[in-house]
């Protein structure tokens, strides 16, 4: 009996084909990527509109001043996030694509721009909501009119903060996964065009 499996020998002896991407492949990837970014941004803008509507409604209806202040801070956070999303991660205009030196350079720059935006999501996407969430949750859970003992209100506040931290950590983790995916795409693009 031989030491090596014939399939293993066949696999190890095969010639490796160099990986290359055609210009059409890159154009197709760039088009799909722009569509993905556009759909993500539309979803984010719709979510921000919902946040603004819900917390605006709460700011009007709930008589507790800290809850109103928290709701308004959350609305301001949502508006800031929309502005930063547009500035950092918006879909490039057709004029920018047309003015690009090459499709490859343009697509690489777009991948790198989206990667930079996602790698700093904690700063421009999550942090703007923290003040409003703290004030809002504090106003809801620590209000003296709830009839609960202080220890119960503090426990509810702590549990709410823990849940908020878990959601924020999950959002950050998902965005870091997307950063790794973009890193792989950039690497593949650079390997494929050499």
Image (cartoon, rainbow, N blue to C red):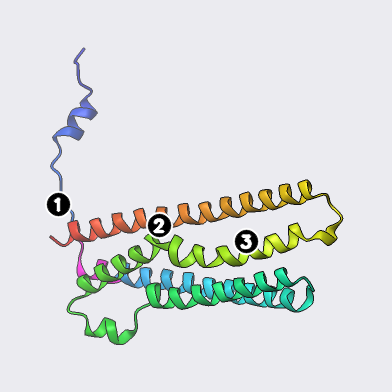
Pick whichever of labels 2 and 3 is earlier in the sequence. Answer: 3
- Dividing the image into 4 quarters, which one contains the C terminus? bottom left
Residue 101: x and y, percent? 17, 79
- Residue name at image x 58 percent, y 65 percent: 131
Residue under label 3: 134
- Residue name at image x 58 percent, y 71 percent: 47
Residue under label 1: 18
Residue under label 2: 178
Would residue 187 be found to the left or right of residue 32 on screen? left
Query: What's the CA distance linking mark 2 and mark 1?
Result: 27 Å
Q: Secondary structure at mark 2?
A: helix
Q: Secondary structure at mark 3?
A: helix
- Dividing the image into 4 quarters, which one contains the N terminus? top left
Residue 127: x and y, percent? 50, 63
Residue 138 lies in what quarter of the image?
bottom right
Q: Residues within 10 Å of mark 2 (few under 14, many from 20)?
A: some
- Residue name at image x 44 percent, y 63 percent: 123
> Camera-side residue: 169 or 24?
169
Which residue of the protein is positioned furthest toward the right in this rendering? Answer: 147
> Camera-side residue: 145 or 28?
145
> Camera-side residue: 6 or 170?
170
Query: What's the CA distance linking mark 2 and mark 3?
Result: 28 Å
| Labels 2 & 1 near each other (Cβ < 8 A) | no
Q: Which residues are magenta?
A: 21-27
């Amino acid at each position: 009996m031989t030491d090596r499996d014939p399939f293993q020998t066949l696999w190890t002896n095969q010639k490796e084909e160099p990986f290359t991407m055609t210009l059409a492949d890159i154009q197709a990837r760039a088009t799909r990527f722009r569509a993905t970014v556009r759909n993500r941004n539309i979803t984010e803008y719709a979510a921000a509109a919902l946040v603004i509507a819900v917390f605006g409604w709460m700011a009007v209806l709930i008589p507790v001043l800290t809850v109103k202040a928290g709701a308004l801070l959350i609305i301001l956070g949502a508006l800031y996030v929309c502005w930063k999303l547009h500035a950092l991660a918006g879909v490039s205009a057709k004029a920018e694509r047309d003015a690009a030196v090459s499709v490859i350079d343009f697509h690489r720059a777009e991948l790198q721009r989206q990667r930079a935006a996602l790698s700093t999501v904690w700063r421009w996407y999550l942090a703007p909501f923290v003040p409003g969430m703290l004030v809002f949750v504090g106003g809801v859970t620590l209000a003296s009119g709830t009839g609960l003992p202080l220890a119960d209100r503090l426990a509810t506040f702590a549990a709410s903060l823990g849940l908020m931290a878990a959601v924020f950590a999950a959002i950050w983790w998902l965005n870091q996964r997307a950063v790794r995916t973009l890193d792989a795409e950039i690497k593949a693009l650079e390997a494929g065009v050499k």
